[in-house]
Image: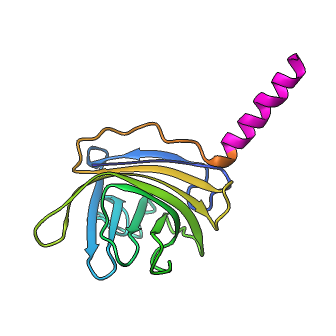
Amino acid sequence: MILSFESSKQSWVGQGESHTVSPSDGYIFSTRTERFDNSLSFQISSLNSPFGPNWNPSSGDSYNYWGLELAAPFDRVLSAGLYENTARYPFQDDSQSGLTFYGNHRGNNTNSGFFEILDISFDDLGGINKIAVNFTQYDETNPDWWVNGQLRYNSELPLTAVPLPASIWLFLTALLLLLRKKTC
């Protein structure tokens, strides 16, 4: 189990931070599957967070926690594939996929983005056995306020290079064209 993400400095949720955490770093991974809306929720918490067993609000210790929520359109079950044009879960339209990444007391009113499930399986009762998912969330639907992340839960697939957000690709393309124009 591992969560890895990076974020732009403008991201309210990510605050320009990058983290890669696993149980060996002292983090707990918990899940919830909702059959009625085809969603999965993950909570990743340090042991001393409000969601961990060592929570002591008077200690003054710093802690981290993050949540990732994914949903297929209402008439589909989550399966391997690309889910584009997401909206904030659980407020997306029935025909739309849902995505929400939040943490450390920060969340969005609205968001957009996409996620790709590379590997997924459920048990006989509909609970999650394993998942490998990459995601990009645009805070408040602004492509400059991004969080790119990956979650591996009981999946053997390794972390992969996360693609840059479209706004960075546009900037790099424009810069390349500008430099090319100067040399011609």
> Against 79, is 178 above or below?
above
Indicate left or right for 154 with 22 as reference: left
Pinpoint residue 174: horizontal percent, then vertical percent.
78, 36
Q: What residue span does the magenta drawing correspond to?
A: 168-184
Residue for point 78% across, 32% down = 175
Residue for point 37% across, 63% down = 49
Among the 4 quarters of the image, the one containing residue 76? bottom left
Nearest the camera: 28 or 77?
77
Pinpoint residue 156: horizontal percent, then vertical percent.
23, 42
Q: How many labels does the image show?
A: 0
Among the 4 quarters of the image, the one containing residue 183? top right
Pinpoint residue 79: horizontal percent, then vertical percent.
30, 60
Indicate left or right for 7 with 20 as reference: right
Nearest the camera: 65 or 122?
122
Nearest the camera: 42 or 124?
124
> Against 81, is 104 above or below?
below
Q: Quadrant of the C terminus?
A: top right
> Does the segment drawn in magenta span residue 78?
no
Magenta region's main secondary structure?
helix
Pinpoint residue 6: horizontal percent, then vertical percent.
53, 46
Residue for point 64% across, 68% down = 140
